[in-house]
Amino acid sequence: MKSTLRILVLTLALSVTAFTTSCSDDDKDPPVISFPTNGNQYEVKVGESFNFSFNVVAEGGYASHSLESTTGQGTIVADNSSIGEGTKEFTISGSYTASDVAGPDGIKLTVQDNEGAESSAIINVDILN
């Protein structure tokens, strides 16, 4: 009976060790996106423009990104500078032009890394008359 218990304890210990090893820090985090205002919204008058930028750290390396207006009330022109495949730290920038309708909007950036992890961030915009 003692040897059976000893084998059971040894098997359990090896199982825990194998699980712990497979759950190591080899998994990459999704991209981390920040921007200079970090939560403060931009205010812009109808028809006016401003420049914006997002800073990104992607442990898994750059794969792709997209920029969009969250409500369609503004036009985004991206700086199409090439970001090298697999780059881990980079900036995505462009300009935003408000429409002729006052109200809330946002600039949404979505970044996907080479490991399939994805993150999004939004710069809030208030379009004023």
Image (tube, helix red, strand yellow):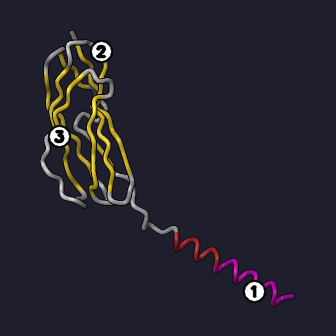
Amino acid type, label 3 = Ser
Task: Measure the alpha-carbon separation of dots 1 and 3.
Answer: 60 Å
Span of residues in magenta? 1-14
Task: Measure the alpha-carbon separation of dots 2 and 1.
Answer: 69 Å
Task: Tell me if residue 107 comes above or below residue 85 in the rendering.
Answer: above
SS under mark 3:
strand
Task: Measure the alpha-carbon separation of dots 2 and 3.
Answer: 23 Å
Q: Residue furthest bottom?
A: 3
**C-beta proximity under 8 Å, tags 2 and 3:** no
Q: Mark 2, residues whose alpha carbon is within 10 Å: few (<14), some, or many (≥20)?
A: some
SS under mark 2:
strand
In the picture of the structure, the residue carrying the numbered disc 1 is: 7
Assess whether residue 94 is covered by the magenta stretch. no
In the picture of the structure, the residue carrying the numbered disc 2 is: 103
Instruction: Tell me which label, 1 or 3, sits earlier in the chain.
Output: 1
Q: Mark 3, residues whose alpha carbon is within 10 Å: few (<14), some, or many (≥20)?
A: many
Assess whether residue 13 is covered by the magenta stretch. yes
What's the residue at 14%, 27% (across, down)?
50
What's the residue at 25%, 39% (across, down)?
35
Q: Main secondary structure of the magenta part?
A: helix
Amino acid type, label 2 = Gly
Instruction: Tell me which label, 2 or 3, sits earlier in the chain.
Output: 3
**Horizontal and vertical percent position of residue 101:** 24, 12
Judged by depth in the image, the label closer to the viewer, 1 or 3, is 3
Judged by depth in the image, the label closer to the viewer, 2 or 1, is 2
Amino acid type, label 1 = Ile
What's the residue at 36%, 46% (across, down)?
119
Name the disc covering residue 108, or none.
none
Locate residue 51 relative to residue 23 in the image: left or right: left
SS under mark 1:
helix
Rendered-image quadrant of the N terminus: bottom right
What's the residue at 83%, 88% (across, down)?
2
